[in-house]
Image: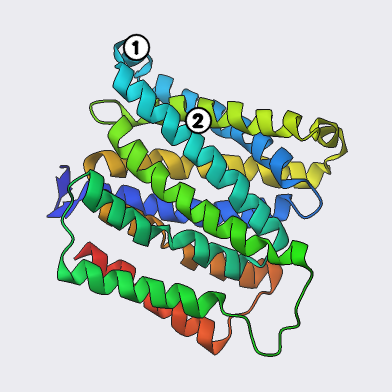
Amino acid sequence: MYRRGGIRMWIFYAFGSALFAGLTSILAKCGIRHTDSDVATAIRTIVVLIFSWIMVFVVGAQDGIAAVSSKTWLFLILSGLATGASWLCYFHALQAGDVNKVVPIDKSSTILTIVLAFLFLGEEVSALKIVCVILIGAGTFLMIQKKETEKSVGQEKKSWRLYACLSAGFASLTSILGKIGIEGLNSNLGTAIRTAVVLLMAWIMVFAKGKQKEIGRIDRRELGFICLSGLATGGSWLCYYKALQDGLASVVVPIDKLSILVTIAFSYLVFHEKLTKRAALGLVLIVAGTLLMIL
């Protein structure tokens, strides 16, 4: 592993991923106020694909595609499919629900990732990690609880919880499948390949639902935010899979989920979404559990 001054370099990449991921949620929310979430996902994936392949050629990793094994192709494709499903669910939830409620559920994928990393990657689950899982789980529960004064909304609006949970489940699978898929492969090339799979899946969903007509109706301002969210996603992915390649999935994923701090800070500044005392306590528990995971 890469080290500088005793610090593992993959940890820096993981924090970089968290920063970009936090910005992604806010930029995407700005871009889907009046734009269909499936269409927005498909468009932003184009930006991510272009960005990721530019990085492949910048680092000179394009020749490595000929040496990609069938096993690697399989897991990269599966990882891409899981990512596509996670994205579609996540942005549907983000469009219907509050950022401060959707993001904590999505970030709870940390818990499932740790379990899967233990089962399939053989990563150690220490007593400290179990404590961290409990803290993160409790924090997530506190953050998504409805306020007593909150009025019930229609069934369609309530569906964001289901989509947020599905997003978390698919995100966990993405991490494990991606970890296996980039073994012995340049992380930039692996990211570019799986992004192509996500792009294909996203556009199939758009045409399958007959939403292609919505493309010409997108507001230019929202289109700008969608493209910026794509760039932020590309930056997050490049950092994330570099960290995942060199580090432990059970540690990289929790650090990446610290993006919740960036997201909540900007959701307050941009959307004026405030945390209750209960939710603030939940945020503290999530952050504490995540930071302890690094030890």
Residue at the limit of the structure toward the left, as seen here: 6
- Residue beneath the point at 46% across and 61% down: 107
Q: Nearer the viewer, residue 127 or 1?
A: 127
Q: Nearer the viewer, residue 261 or 140?
A: 140
* Residue neighbourhood size for the residue with mark 2, other residues' Cα within 10 Å, grouped as few (<14), some (14–19), many (≥20): many
Q: Where 262 falls versus 79 (above or below)?
A: below
Q: Looking at the image, do the residues carrying marks 2 and 1 touch, with CB atoms under 8 Å apart? A: no
Residue that mark 1 sits on = 63
Q: Nearer the viewer, mark 2 or mark 1?
A: 2
Residue that mark 2 sits on = 195
In percent of width and height, residue 83 lies at 50, 40
| Number of marks in picture | 2
Q: Quadrant of residue 59?
A: top left
* Quadrant in which the C terminus appears: bottom left
- Residue beneath the point at 25% across and 65% down: 293
In percent of width and height, residue 48 lies at 55, 34
